[in-house]
Image (cartoon, rainbow, N blue to C red):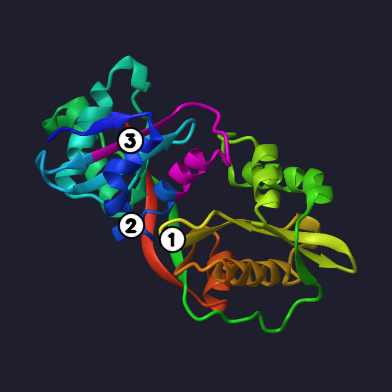
Amino acid sequence: MSWQLTHDVEEFRSAADPYLAADAARHTILLTVSESLRTGGVAYAGPVRFGWWRETPDAPVTGAFVETRPYPPFLGTMPARAAAELARTLGDAPEDHGAAPSAVRGRVADVEAFGAAWTARRTGAGNAAPYRLSGGMRLFRLGGPVPPDPAPEGRARYADAQDLPLAVEWLTAFAEEIGDPPARDPRAMAVARIEERRLLLWEVDGVPVSLAGHAPLVAGQIRVAPVYTPPAHRGRGYAAGVTDAVGAAALRTGADEVLLFADNANPTACALYQRLGYRPVEEYATAELA
């Protein structure tokens, strides 16, 4: 069966919910993006595209993706055949579904299957220009929380309305530092997280020095993002303190799984998260397409 594409989040969730919930950790991006659209918590810069795949018309969904432009499509877990068919589908999608992608993101195995099919289709199987993997990320799951040792000076508190300008400034700085294009309005994101008590500040003597937030609870999982400390306050353990605090806050909401992504190119952050009790789940990457 061919892939089904839509801009309708309710149509997507109606079809894909059992598939998403069966492996909520690996589908955290698809779950949190679609849930934010359903609840109106965050407005994206452009139309959001979804897709799902079945082996046969009567079979359960076993593959899906979400695309929030200008970010590339993010793939859920899927069979290699589904990834190869998705390369054809996105290359041939009608104009009202947007331009063909220049990259895809997801588990390494899934983006490799997509990338191989994409380049073979574009250049001919006998003369395929190789796609290139970049942007390696690791998904972590919180096991038994381990408080930072030594404990940093200061304490955590929820951000409130008076913190909105600072939150917008730091969310913008975080996106710029990691090279993310502006897919979401940082002010709208800050407002939603403050109102829903999903944004924490670490402060010392009443002065905020670090920030961490988390996505809403959906399908039993919560994803921590972002974690940001301004350069002037780094190296003092504040990120450890606020990360530990936001993980505890997520658990208090009733989450079965608390997740986060870390950049493999930042071994300091990866080591920190593991000291705090996070354990590796899966490797992710971006396939840059020829």
Mark 3 vs mark 1: give the one in front: 3
Position of residue 161 measured from the top left corner of the image (x, y, whole percent): 80, 48
In what quadrant of the picture does the C terminus appear? top left
Q: Pick whichever of labels 3 and 2 is earlier in the sequence.
A: 3
Q: Residue at x 37, y 59 (%)?
A: 24
- Residue on which the image places disc 1: 138
Quarter occupied by residue 284: bottom left
Using residue 36 as the reference point, say whether residue 186 is left or right of it. Answer: right
Pointer 1 local density, CA inside 10 Å: few below 14, some 14–19, many at least 20? some
Res. 70 mark: none
- Residue on which the image places disc 3: 11
Cα–Cα gap, marks 1 and 2 = 20 Å
Q: Which residues are magenta?
A: 32-52
- Residue on which the image places disc 2: 21
Quarter occupied by residue 34: top left
The answer to whether the residue labelled 3 contacts the one labelled 2, judged by CB atoms less than 8 Å apart, is: no
Position of residue 165 measured from the top left corner of the image (x, y, whole percent): 80, 43
Q: Nearer the viewer, residue 128 or 93?
A: 93
Up the image or down, 186 lies above or below 23; here it is: above
Q: Residue at x 81, y 73 (%)?
A: 154
Q: Is residue 51 magenta?
A: yes
Task: Tell me which amino acid carries mark 3.
Answer: Glu
Q: Is residue 99 magenta?
A: no
Using residue 187 as the reference point, say whether residue 77 is left or right of it. Answer: left
Pointer 3 local density, CA inside 10 Å: few below 14, some 14–19, many at least 20? few
Q: Secondary structure at mark 1?
A: strand
Q: Residue at x 69, y 49 (%)?
A: 195
Task: Tell me which amino acid carries mark 1.
Answer: Arg
Q: Secondary structure at mark 3?
A: helix
| Residue that lies at the very extreme toward the right in this rendered image | 205
Position of residue 82 measured from the top left corner of the image (x, y, whole percent): 18, 42
Up the image or down, 241 lies above or below 25; here it is: below
